[in-house]
Amino acid sequence: MKKYRAGIIGCGGIGLKHASAYAQITNVELVAGADPSDRREAEYRQIGIKSFYRDASKMLAQEGLDLVSVCTGPSVHAQMTIIAAKAGVKGIICEKPMAPDLIQCDAMIEACKLNRVKLAVGHQRRYGKQYAKGREVVASGVLGEPLLLWAMTPGSDVMTWGVHWIDMFHFFMQGYKVISVMGQVDVERQTLTGHKDFVEDALLGHLMFDNKIRAILECGDLAQLEPGFPAHATIRIYGPSGRFEANDIGYTLSMGNLYEYVPVESPFEQKDDVQMWVDEIKELIGCIEQDREHQSDGYAGRTTIEIANAIWESARSRRLIKLPLEPVESPLYALWKGNDRPWNKTIMKL
């Protein structure tokens, strides 16, 4: 069995999930991490990393890595993915969101293609059993032809959480693609994340698939919880025969007199639960060995960014957006008040 050397770029909270997953795979050796800060170095050492770097380029030059997880802030995902691809790694998992705009997504895809690197984007929920159940329900036809997909992310923006549901819309609707987008956003508070990324406070997106099925996405202040509803981002599938609902703590299938509820322990609340990341990495290794593409490859990741950007462009230009969307700088930036953009120093020019 071939052995793979793995490293983490961006040793924060989500990087711990990746590191723990690598440590559980018998033919992977977790050897190094890179982060400008040493704030969580002790936690990573407990998992097994021995070498730490303040500069990712130095780690890539010295450690001979085969696998790399990019777990930095979104504004440098493209930069880190590109330098890793050029350094000769075999596979990269870039956390979501893939990048702020399609220009950067395309640069990432091209760098991996030129250097024969397999790229996966971190939409790990594809491996959660409740979401696999949703795909099974749609494929089985027990709900009838889906009428509407709906998802909401209370207290979170489209790039932090909403892209997961955009990806899940496509995961459920295999073989279909979104052809038009209408959106509205609220940016009144001019919110910045901890990574200094500008995000909307509320967002509403209407997506139309090429089979005429609609999907609705509600984010942030707009995603109000129903009475008694759990405080978890949730996705639903409505059909003429019933409804399927899933979130990180379980799923519900309602059909006439049938009511099936299956609880799940959220991996984000269970420190040692990294099975979704293990599955994601094992698939990446299989893609390397069999020369095939990952189910959540760069093009799948790009699709989520195209739709997020289309929602922002619709809000900016006040019109229905037909896809494909031309690669341009993120339309969300145009909604910032004034010329002093706090994130400018982190936006990478490719």
Image (cartoon, rainbow, N blue to C red):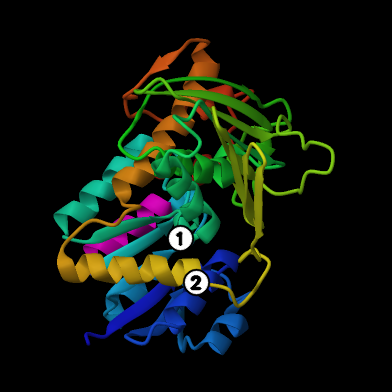
Question: How many angstroms separate mark 2 from mark 1 (CA)?
Answer: 8 Å
Nearer to the camera, 67 or 37 = 67
State which quadrant residue 202 falls in. Answer: top right
Task: Examine the residues drawn in magenta and state their main secondary structure.
Answer: helix
Q: Residues within 10 Å of mark 2 (few under 14, many from 20)?
A: some
Residue 127, numbered label: 1
- At which x and y percent is residue 341? 58, 34
Q: Residue at point 36% right, 28% down?
A: 328
The structure residue drawn at horizontal position 45% and vertical position 43%, both measured from the top left corner, is 167
Going by the numbered disc 2, the residue's amino acid type is Gln
User: Where does residue 243 sit, x and y in percent of width and height?
Assistant: 60, 37
Q: At 35% from the left edge and 74% from the top edge, which residue is drawn?
A: 58
Magenta region: which residues?
A: 77-88
Which residue corresponds to mark 2?
Answer: 275
Most distant residue in the top direction:
319
Reply yes or no: does residue 85 show up in magenta: yes
Residue 174 in the figure: left or right of residue 196:
left
Can you tell which mark lies on residue 143? Answer: none
Judge whether residue 228 is colored magenta: no
Front one among 251 and 27: 251
- N-term mark: 2 or 1: 1
**x, y percent for residue 198:** 59, 38
3 to the left or right of 78:
left
Graded by Cα atoms within 10 Å as few (under 14), some (14 to 19) or many (20 or more), the crowding at tag 1 reads some
Figure check: 93 above or below 303: below
Identify the image quadrant of residue 103. top left
Can residue 198 be seen here? The reply is yes
In this view of the protein, which residue sits in the foreground, 48 or 33?
Answer: 48
Is there any visible trace of residue 330 in the rendered image? no
Q: Position of residue 178 (x, y in %)?
A: 38, 27
Disc 1 on helix, strand or loop?
helix
Q: Are circles 2 and 1 on residues that touch, CB within 8 Å?
A: yes
